[in-house]
Amino acid sequence: MVQLAEMGGVEPGFYVSQCSATTGVTNDAWDQRRYVDASTVPYAALPNLPHVRLGDFGLIIRNSTGDSIGFFFGDTVAGSHLGECSGAVKLEIASERNAEDEGFSFIVFPGSGTGTLSQAPV
């Protein structure tokens, strides 16, 4: 979907960046304001992890520097690969060019969220 000026698009002409985490501002799938802002909200895509649900929390640590950021699981991904995150994570702890290719540790807290993303923590 492309944002349209006549429909109140935040950035007309750009695609709507969808994820499972919503803001509660609107229920319109075509409205970018429906979804959390990946550039400011640190979240990760939930892989197939036992006992972990959407909305659960965790901590990401950049191994080379010790920098860290808290996050919540705000989207889903197929398979068991952990590491797909919002741009806010990169901007906060790995902003240098290609820093996202370094090693990161994830500490996950199963059952720490509500188990639903009807309105994500922002």
Image (cartoon, rainbow, N blue to C red):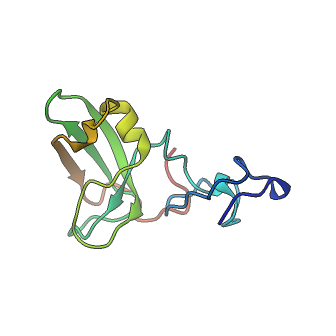
Residue at (31% x, 33% y) in the render: 97
Q: Position of residue 62 (x, y in %)?
A: 20, 35
Q: Nearer the viewer, residue 35 or 52?
A: 35
Identity of the residue drawn at 27% across and 41% down: 100
Q: Residue sitting at 71 percent across and 47 percent down?
A: 10
Judge from the rendering whether residue 49 lies leftward or rightward of residue 33; answer left or right.
left
Q: Is residue 77 left or right of residue 4?
A: left
Q: Is residue 4 left or right of residue 43?
A: right
> What is the number of callouts on the image?
0
- Place residue 52 in its image quadrant: bottom left
Q: Which residue is the extreme one toward the right?
A: 6
User: What residue sits 31% from the left and 32% below the top?
Assistant: 93
Q: How far across and how far down the image is residue 31, in percent?
A: 70, 59
Instruction: Find residue 55 and report its horizontal and vertical position in percent.
Output: 40, 58
In the displayed structure, 40 sits above or below 74; it is above
In the image, 37 versus 73, the foreground residue is 37
Q: Is residue 104 left or right of residue 21?
A: left
Given residues 56 and 10, the one toward you in this image is: 10
> Is the N terminus in the top left, top right, bottom left or bottom right quadrant?
bottom right
Residue 25: x percent and y percent?
A: 69, 53
